[in-house]
Amino acid sequence: MSCFSHFFKRKRGPQQQDDPSDNYFTGSENITRFSYRELVRATSNFDQGNKIGEGGYGPVYKGTLKDGTVIAVKVLSLHSRQGAKEFLNELLAISDVTHENLVKLYGCCVEGNHRILVYNYLENNSLAHTLLDSRHSNIQFNWRTRVNICIGVAQGLAFLHGSVSPHIVHRDIKASNIL
């Protein structure tokens, strides 16, 4: 389940030349910094054939790193209003979050105007995709499976709300965010 709040960026003025990401990444070993070029290569230049979703944050692409690792690449929409500093503050808050019911954040790209999150790719896509896609429309979940899905969602949210400090509030629970 992808349980993180939306990130937004703010347009930077010409007087803001320094990249605040340089200072923020010095103490965080859990955040892998990807170059924009690496992610362009991994997603075949953000090819529409690799697009696996889109939300308020922006489009999400499937990608493959040089070492063969399959990733989900979540690109912040250019229409967002969050600046680099705010983006990095939120990124640092979620970088150490690990739970079996939450998607693992591998890293990010903060380069120029690009704000991109890189997650573990989950092959089965979202609950919404499974339920609504015409190729899967005949899938019926029994009650035990339905209850297990609900319990998994509740456990992930309880972890974010109660076990993480500071607490993280998801703010966008829906079937397309349950993976």
Image (spheres, helix red, strand yellow):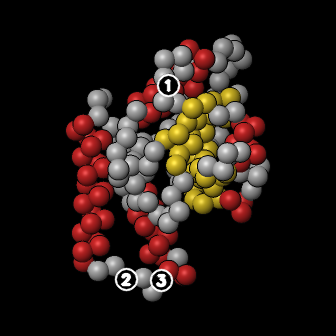
Please state which of residues 140 and 83 is positioned toward the viewer in this rendering. 140
Residue farthest to the front?
Answer: 67
Residue drawn at x 68%, y 59% as measured from the top left: 50
Quarter occupied by the N terminus? bottom left
Give the image location of residue 102, x and y in percent. 38, 49
Q: Are marks 2 and 1 in contact (CB under 8 Å)?
A: no
Could you tell me which secondary element the residue under label 3 belongs to?
loop
Amino acid type of the residue tagged 1 in the rendering: Glu
Could you tell me which secondary element the residue under label 1 belongs to?
loop
Distance in Å between CA atoms under marks 2 and 3: 8 Å
**Label 2: how many Cα within 10 Å (few below 14, some 14–19, many 20+):** few
Residue identified by numbered label 2? 140
Residue identified by numbered label 1? 29
Residue identified by numbered label 3? 137
Distance in Å between CA atoms under marks 2 and 1: 43 Å
Distance in Å between CA atoms under marks 3 and 1: 43 Å
Residue drawn at x 47%, y 64% as measured from the top left: 126
